[in-house]
Amino acid sequence: MVHFATALAALAAALAPVVSAAGNFTYTRINKDDAVLLVVDHQIGLFQLVRDFEPDEYRNNVLAHAAIGKVFGLPTILTTSAETGPNGPLPKEIVEMHPDAAFIKRNGEVDAWDSADFRKAVRATGKKQVIIGGITTDVCTTFLALSLVQEGYTVFANVDASGAMSKRTADDANERMRAAGVHVLSSFAVVCDLMRDWRNTPGSTQILPFFDKYLAAYGYLARGHAAAVSRGTILPGESE
Amino acid sequence: MVHFATALAALAAALAPVVSAAGNFTYTRINKDDAVLLVVDHQIGLFQLVRDFEPDEYRNNVLAHAAIGKVFGLPTILTTSAETGPNGPLPKEIVEMHPDAAFIKRNGEVDAWDSADFRKAVRATGKKQVIIGGITTDVCTTFLALSLVQEGYTVFANVDASGAMSKRTADDANERMRAAGVHVLSSFAVVCDLMRDWRNTPGSTQILPFFDKYLAAYGYLARGHAAAVSRGTILPGESE
Amino acid sequence: MVHFATALAALAAALAPVVSAAGNFTYTRINKDDAVLLVVDHQIGLFQLVRDFEPDEYRNNVLAHAAIGKVFGLPTILTTSAETGPNGPLPKEIVEMHPDAAFIKRNGEVDAWDSADFRKAVRATGKKQVIIGGITTDVCTTFLALSLVQEGYTVFANVDASGAMSKRTADDANERMRAAGVHVLSSFAVVCDLMRDWRNTPGSTQILPFFDKYLAAYGYLARGHAAAVSRGTILPGESE
Amino acid sequence: MVHFATALAALAAALAPVVSAAGNFTYTRINKDDAVLLVVDHQIGLFQLVRDFEPDEYRNNVLAHAAIGKVFGLPTILTTSAETGPNGPLPKEIVEMHPDAAFIKRNGEVDAWDSADFRKAVRATGKKQVIIGGITTDVCTTFLALSLVQEGYTVFANVDASGAMSKRTADDANERMRAAGVHVLSSFAVVCDLMRDWRNTPGSTQILPFFDKYLAAYGYLARGHAAAVSRGTILPGESE
Amino acid sequence: MVHFATALAALAAALAPVVSAAGNFTYTRINKDDAVLLVVDHQIGLFQLVRDFEPDEYRNNVLAHAAIGKVFGLPTILTTSAETGPNGPLPKEIVEMHPDAAFIKRNGEVDAWDSADFRKAVRATGKKQVIIGGITTDVCTTFLALSLVQEGYTVFANVDASGAMSKRTADDANERMRAAGVHVLSSFAVVCDLMRDWRNTPGSTQILPFFDKYLAAYGYLARGHAAAVSRGTILPGESE
Amino acid sequence: MVHFATALAALAAALAPVVSAAGNFTYTRINKDDAVLLVVDHQIGLFQLVRDFEPDEYRNNVLAHAAIGKVFGLPTILTTSAETGPNGPLPKEIVEMHPDAAFIKRNGEVDAWDSADFRKAVRATGKKQVIIGGITTDVCTTFLALSLVQEGYTVFANVDASGAMSKRTADDANERMRAAGVHVLSSFAVVCDLMRDWRNTPGSTQILPFFDKYLAAYGYLARGHAAAVSRGTILPGESE
Amino acid sequence: MVHFATALAALAAALAPVVSAAGNFTYTRINKDDAVLLVVDHQIGLFQLVRDFEPDEYRNNVLAHAAIGKVFGLPTILTTSAETGPNGPLPKEIVEMHPDAAFIKRNGEVDAWDSADFRKAVRATGKKQVIIGGITTDVCTTFLALSLVQEGYTVFANVDASGAMSKRTADDANERMRAAGVHVLSSFAVVCDLMRDWRNTPGSTQILPFFDKYLAAYGYLARGHAAAVSRGTILPGESE
Amino acid sequence: MVHFATALAALAAALAPVVSAAGNFTYTRINKDDAVLLVVDHQIGLFQLVRDFEPDEYRNNVLAHAAIGKVFGLPTILTTSAETGPNGPLPKEIVEMHPDAAFIKRNGEVDAWDSADFRKAVRATGKKQVIIGGITTDVCTTFLALSLVQEGYTVFANVDASGAMSKRTADDANERMRAAGVHVLSSFAVVCDLMRDWRNTPGSTQILPFFDKYLAAYGYLARGHAAAVSRGTILPGESE
């Protein structure tokens, strides 16, 4: 009789995630202590292929993505594909921003996870959450993201940091990642979820300067506010 | 042998929602007697960041969202984030519209659910359905919506009342909410589902004036109809 | 021991649709012998609210939707909401096209399924598949579609025949329907699935004239082909 | 001394239009008694090339263009280019609508004005204003329009009736026509300028049915108004 | 010899505007003491035809247009076309805002300038500059604007207050007006040009409340600034 | 007791895919040794209906789709629908590219899977993965894709090779395919997944020329790189 | 008295173009016997900057532009800017297509007209009409076009062959060229104006193959027509 | 007789510019020795109103505009409107970039030319060409540009540096400037016209670093080229 009970218990255990998925929703938040940041093939040659963002806006987004690792102290891994070929090297600003990051220069693998060195670097961080951005969204980001999910990682795809040959291609790739359970979200959401509370460290002291540099809309909002507080005057007719 | 039967019964019970989810669809409608309305971070500073609606259209939508609480007599909760900072205060029209609403001024928590005061205010309503809108869609609305779903609430996200830095960011955030079971729908659908029947109270007597104020297309349609009935004339060549 | 086996059998039966859903995909095709067509609130007042199609294109689509019932001999049900009010009557072309159709004039229910007369009319057809289009997509179409799915119907939403106040609102409504298992598809797909084979009846003999009337792109393609076959000449330099 | 005065007078006369153009603006209105309507290469093969309108919308526009000649009793000229070739014939509805119209079937001339028969047909009308629409905008419409202006005609290009391979191509072609003094305007403006006053003949008696057929937005507005006047009821809460 | 000199002088005089136009540009500014505001056919039925703005945004723009007359004390003339027919009456807010304005209810003339009453009302103001907005842009606004220019008026077309059946139609109509010398500009530009200096009357005292009501983006900017000056606090990390 | 264990084992087996689907994600990659390429109804008449791509871009995409079979040596099946009718024949380039491919000319079946010849041809390849593209996306591609999934095939829909009457129609069709488990992805992703590693065969030696022919952005990037390596010079001020 | 007459004659002569421009419009057509084709900086590096066309579509357009010289036997001049630098060389297909063309490799001049070699090459053709396309539209095309107009050339700018960093930038550049009298038109219009009549040489014999290669929409239309004529069959229900 | 000749000469002289304008086009190029750069109201509060560019892209463009003065050594004038009010101060980066620039802080004048200090500052430069950018395009840029043209300046409006509340508003404002003879062009065109030849000073030595900073697309193109020249390798299958 024992093995019946055992079998049933095994069955119940196997079913737990199904039941959980169907009946309960677990909100997975980004945990800055359990996250690694991946900078995937943001190479200056591939950059030319990106058409779902304006070039200056996209360069800003790519640098912001890399800087998330810096401001939150996340382990960061850089990788490139055949960088002496047409794809070209990473922007030097990123390499200089992360002098100590693992930097895996792949020579042939399209999906970075197919590279033993890359897998080793990711595993070495011991983290279970992965924040990812890359060029192109449908190949370099998606292939890797799907491999990571299969491997058991929780993946957060920073939409603003991945670039594709068209908005349409990016949309389809994002749907493909979502279907695998990847969390597809904005750079702003990534940063806010890592911070959680403006009173934390990193908190407003670190993040407002980050926004001032990489998120002009918020940066100028804060500058305007600071100017008003410190030396603003009320115009006739103006009221709150 | 008894505990086998017990185990099987427990297993069957655990499986019920799965089976139900897969085999039967339950249409969850908004119940005006079980719903609370949340006005989340619709602050005048954050308003500047919103680019998925035109500014005048969006202001109209935000005021309409707040007015839904009024016209249907829903418990309404206001919340802001660091309102003496760049985010700024709520539009005074909203505060004046809801003088008795719980108003939680958060000082650091990005996700309002992280605020004990906010959780308390929501729980105090005793409602199980939550209608939500906020700025920005991807952070303030989504983080809170996901927390609420995890907590067991049924969440209705009013698309027209949430604003994001781009349409693209809003789309991705809405997908994220949908994946968690959030009902993402238009302001018009929220109001019509709350009303159910034009002969109810609130019904056409209350809702037509609401549309006249906040939904110009329908408001002018009704005005034109009223004018035609009361003093219209048929032009030569005109026929039904 | 018997009731264990019984319990297991019941459990297995209960699990069958789950397993089927997850492991096997069943392609549900539209069966012209088991389908009813619903024309929901395509009223001339509500028509003014539709902004996700051009007006002349949308009128064409609405008439085409109604004509699907005609060309395939489907039972067709017409319904309107408060038609002496701002919403206005149905286009007379539709009423004249379906003189014998059940026509339910609702006086208050937003969701047509809340009308006992409407439910009765649908049930009286004895069909299990429902093809639906209405104004607006997010309210009249979606509310009814979700009710129908809950009731056990298989629902096909004709995207081209439903109109919303914006493309964005239509997109969100369609997502909501999809999440409930509604098949959201084009008018062209509805017609082709009903026909299945150009050699059927209705087949090309009936459907080419239908396309000539309601689908200009295909209609003119066919006209051009017919003209070429019957009296075309090859220009110098032209080749296949 | 006489020939000085003569020379000066000639000079002043020659300068008159310059001065007029620069200092005074003359508003040239369409005169239904001095206008001819041209239907240029609206062939069913060329129809496939048009991508600045939706196909069903564009077919409606083309038929409306041809019908303008009918409703205002304008002399109308049809022309096609190599109609037994890929361009195909005119839609039969147009030919049947204008059984007595001059119909010039060109065999090679791209610019219809290069055809002596076409020139003769236009001149035979004795009109000085030309209303034109054709496929494609940048070739068939523009080439002919520029030739007509050079010939001294006042040209009104019906934007809604001309189709191009892209909106961009149409925009550039319209700019080219404008630079030559062509009046580039909507079909609605053409009709309203021809009518001038709703009390004229043709006036509302003829034009409201025309709009009912070809301009769904206005047609349904009028139908809704007529229905409200004749049998509308005011809903509770509704007011003008 | 005298009449030669006379002839030459006349010729030179006649040429002056040409020379001026070609060689010198005169910047025509709106003069609040010489301007009349026209509210043309902003009727609630015609409102349904407008598709180059969102409905709530456009209603806001129309009311703002009418309010320009109020805030700058401009003579204002209202006109409608067949208002007991499908076009419907003006929004009551406009009529109530201008109880003493000349209000010309045309019964047939499409171009308001064809109405003797309307011409009389405009001439009675003694102004030479006209600020205009109407529905639809390509007919009601354009026809009148072109007539006014021909009549010698300087016309400023408020783009935001005129509505058309499509953005494309509005663009073409605006080009047509520009070719006649109409100044086509935004509502914001109209207001700022009327004000000239924030220290004038009307100046910030009157215009900031106007913007607060009709231009949400600027209104909320000013509210945020006022809030910051009166009770703002600098967050850690925030700087000008 | 044996049959209890058996029943449980069967139950557990039946549940395995559910558990797997919910708890574990399996990343299904395209396997060039197990894939067949389908070219579905890319007929020159149907080509005219496609409006979600520019014509020259789409022709390029269609030829690229067919060439994938060539460059990776995949079994390739061509099919057409009523090719002597309006739909027309396949582009001759495709037929010539695949002289030995199975070519099923259907005479009536809309869904190619309804053709016994087509089913036989697909089954004869012995492959379990299908790469598909067709005109139109919502009918020819989707109907077949859903049938293939039901039949147990893993389906990869090449978005760039399927064309629809509008982007909206394509989006809805792609959603429908995704809901059935179809992998909807770009042509670039299909090729990169087939290749896996640039050092494979086919690898860069075969794929760079393929991109040079069918993917101009990458092709010119590579040409520019090659030119720079072989004969480039650094301009003053230029640096990496 | 003589020199008065002379002075007046000179004055009248000087005024002739003014009068002509204002009072008469001269339609300037492209004359294949007086036209030179310029291929300006269509370099593979600069190609990456172009974002107002899709890459594959734009490559097609660029090759089509170069081929116009071939098919009409126009003198053709190629030029590049610093081609060993980042701008890169011309696509080899263009160089090979025009082995005998003047090819001016500029080393510094942005405006090709600033290069004495280039001026010499253009002047050597003895032509007075110039057909131009280049990258980028706002710099390489516009600067040269404006210089050519100043020099007295009649310039035809092939919109489809010039590429800019955004559609907006191209629009502004095209306006700038138009203001200088440049004829801004589509590639299709350039070809049709050069041909004039399908019966000419080059005429349909040469141009249909040209369209088959570079203008897929027309090419497939003609292929479909040819197929229908030679082996088409009428389907039941199909009619002209 | 003398004064006839004199009169004629005067007349001829007066007519010269007309004749020139009509018959001859003069290409006005930007002369770096005769140009002044204006930075108009690029204030951080007004920045929030700009919706015709993405915020990060627009900030980049504004800084690039200011930097043009730096790299070409142009006299530069900064001006703001009521900077202690809602409009806010200039970005500090601009003020720090131009420590010695005239900086006119206006307290009320909307049109900067209405400020005597501003007029004085512009005149003090002694330049006749003005390069301008500002917020908002339709008010701050346009009003000033029109005043400058009237004053006799040649004005170049840098499109990329001016921001408006919508693309539509910017388009209309740009048309208004063009009608007055303003040269409306891209930032890239401004820089290239100032440079003229890559071998000049400033030339590639100064401008490539400028593009590297402010024009990512070109910057990365050049970086990729430099990397390829210095350490690139040709991949198998890659060719020029």
Image (cartoon, coloured by chain):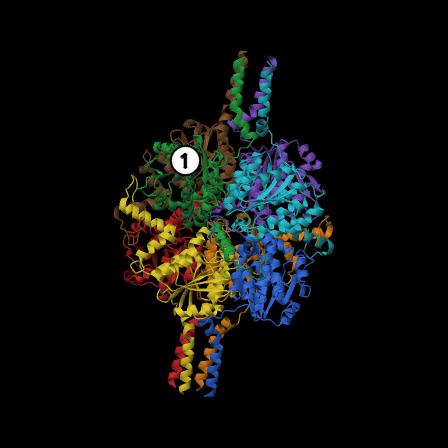
Chain colours: A red, B orange, C blue, D cyan, E purple, F yellow, G green, H brown
Q: Chain of mark 1?
A: G
Q: Is residue E34 left or right of residue A210?
A: right
Residue F232: quadrant of the picture: top left
Q: Residue furthest top?
A: H1
Between C142 and A21, the residue placed more toward the observer is C142
Q: Is residue D129 left or right of residue C169?
A: right
Place of residue G15 in the rendered image (x, y in percent of width and height, measured from the top left) = 53, 24
Q: Is residue F78 depicted above or below G29 in this figure? A: below
Q: Around disc 1, counting alpha carbons within 10 Å, would you say few (fewer than 14), some (14 to 19), or many (20 or more)?
A: many
Is any part of residue D210 visible from this angle? yes
Q: Residue furthest left?
A: H231
The residue positioned 50% from the left and 36% from the top of the image is G29
Q: Is residue E126 depicted above or below D109 in this figure? A: above
Between B189 and B41, the residue placed more toward the observer is B189
Q: What residue is disc 1 on?
A: G144
Between H157 and D15, the residue placed more toward the observer is D15
- Location of the N terminus of chain E (image quadrant): top right
Q: Is residue F126 left or right of residue C231?
A: left
- Location of the C terminus of chain E (image quadrant): top left
Place of residue D42 in the rendered image (x, y in percent of width and height, measured from the top left) = 57, 48
- Callout 1 amino acid: Leu
Place of residue A81 in the rendered image (x, y in percent of width and height, measured from the top left) = 31, 55
Q: Is residue A120 depicted above or below H180 in this figure? A: below
Residue B7: quadrant of the picture: bottom left
Residue E200: quadrant of the picture: top right
